[in-house]
Structures are given as C-alpha cells and as structure tokens.
Image: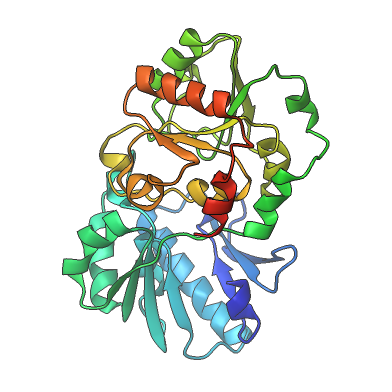
Amino acid sequence: MQRFAHTSRVFFVEEIIPTDHHLPYLEFHAFEGTSVTAVRPRVPHHADPARRETLLAGLLDQMTVLLGVRDPLLWFYTPMMWPAAAHLPASAIVYDCMDELSAFRFAAPDLVRNEALLMEAADVVFTGGHALYEAKRGLHDNVHAFPSSVDQRHFNRARDVRPEPQDHAGLPAPRLGFAGVIDERIDLALLAEAARARPDWSFVMIGPVVKIAETDLPQAPNIHWLGQKDYADLPDYMGGWDVALMPFALNEATRFISPTKTPEYLAAGCPVVSTPVRDVVREYGDLPGVRIARDAVGFVAACAETIAAGKGESGWRTTVDSR
C-alpha cells in the first residue's frame, strides 16, 4: 500500500468499530511512517447488521464526496466489506484473498455469499498462497497466486546484537518462539506435550489470543504467554530465539494458509520448525534452515536437532537469503 501511496492516495478502510454516539462518523488516522490513511468507521453499537451495512455505505459515500475521490480502485481483503461498497463507481475491483475465511471459527453466515458476489464483480483475484490458488482458480478467469513477502530489512535487525525486551531477557535458554495470532489454527495440545517433554526449554508465545478462551491455553512453568507486541519490536524478540516455531494444527482452518511468518522468521535469521502446512512444505520445506514434523514427538526431535545445529549452522542463512 505504501508503494501505491507514492503515486496515489490510499485509504485503508477498517472494519466497523461500535460507538456509544447516536450518529455514525469516520475517524482518519495516519499510519506511522507511511502515506497511507487509515479510515475507521464508527457506527452506533445498537444498530443491527443490516443497518450497520447501510450506515457504512453512507459513510463511504460521504468520504468520496468530501475527499474528491472519483472512480477509485477498490481493493478488498475481506468479502464482508462488499455489501457496503458494491455501489461505488470503481475503475477496477481487486479481491486479495488471503485466507479461506469461511473455514475459520465463528465465520459470518453470509461470508460465502458475499465472497461469491465479490468474485463475480472482481476484475482480478489474488490468493495468499498456492494452496488457496488451487482452490479458487476455477471460480474466476483471472486468478493469480500472490504469496506473502517480507520486509527483509525490518526482520534482518534480529540478526544484530540488540538489547532484549525486559519481559524476554530473563527467560532461560534455549528459547523457542512463536509470533502471530493465537487461535484455532494453533495446535495447543502439541505445544503442551512439547513443553512437558522438554521442561528445560522456554516456549515463548507472542500474539493476541483470538476466538479461544484464555483458560484453554496450556499452562506450564516453561510456557510464556507474552501477549501482543508492536510490529516494530518483533525483531528484538526474535533475535533471542534459538528456534522459531510454527505449531499449526492440521485442520480445515489451516488447509489453505500460507503463513507470512515463515519468511519473517527466516529473514530474522531464525531456523524454523513447522508442522506440515502445505504451502510451508511446498515453498520452504527443502531449505536447510527449515524442519518439518507432523506430531509432538517429531516436533520435539526436530527442535532438538535445530538447537544442536545452532543458529550459526554453516551456510543455511546464505541459502535462505538467496531465495
């Protein structure tokens, strides 16, 4: 989006935020360090779903008039925005399909219908990985696999010697870390079993807990739930990890995922141990800094091999950086 913002105005319309105010309104915020403007629709909390869509559509109309927006390129990350934006006169419509959202827990009942309508209207469809491309390519005649990339310069900072964050510095080594959303896609049973098998390892879990109860999170002296961190601070945490973890469950919610954290971990100089997510195996499974394991026993063994090899394992970073 920042690249688009070099030549065009870019407005990132976020999902609706309820408000106690009796009238809907828009908030505009600058994304720090970019030319992208965040637009936050505030809608009365008592409005039902249909009314919220109507109010959002009206807010979008107001925005285009007030800011002189004509024939915008509409870029959708979620089909749930389609009902409110479908009426806007667009120069082109892009559907950036990053996940099979209908497979996620608590997916909206009208998500599938909205996606079908968006696919019909879209001029081009991008998918977040190859597995998702295989699932969507028969639904539109202009679908392209567009796997996630990485801000390499940002995550390369983890390779430098840096002061560790206060809540991380005192954790015993070796440290095995995860950074991302913690939801139904994470194999919590695998994590618990690995922690029991290796009480001498520190398992560091960073990220918001979403759609699962915090009481469902496995608790152990060597599992450290550090909560959500700023994107800017992630390299400071990753720099202190011996292994970067991707303990994904193998279920419908992970069937089509293409985790952005794979290239992020590798750019940070962290060797990776992952369960066999299709796009991870396909894109990264042959790299020397990546090990794949299906169950807890294999996962622990792969982590042990990675720790024994060390982060400075000869040549693997050079191979990764050349990809």
Residues 130 and 126: in front is 130
In the rendered image, residue 62, in percent from the top left (x then y), is placed at 55, 79
Q: Residue visible at 63% across and 21% down?
A: 174
Q: Is residue 114 left or right of residue 157?
A: left
Is 58 placed above or below 181 here? below
> What quarter of the picture does the N terminus occupy?
bottom right
Q: Residue visible at 33% across and 38% down?
A: 105
Q: Residue furthest front?
A: 314
Q: Is residue 125 left or right of residue 224?
A: left
Q: Is residue 188 visible?
A: no
Q: Quadrant of residue 96?
A: bottom left
In the rendered image, residue 237, in percent from the top left (x then y), is placed at 69, 36
Residues 73 and 247: in front is 247
Is 310 placed above or below 109 here? above
Q: Residue visible at 49% across and 46% down?
A: 262
In the rendered image, residue 317, in percent from the top left (x then y), is placed at 58, 48
Q: Residue visible at 59% across and 40% down?
A: 314
In the rendered image, residue 274, in percent from the top left (x then y), is placed at 42, 35
Q: Is residue 107 visible?
A: yes
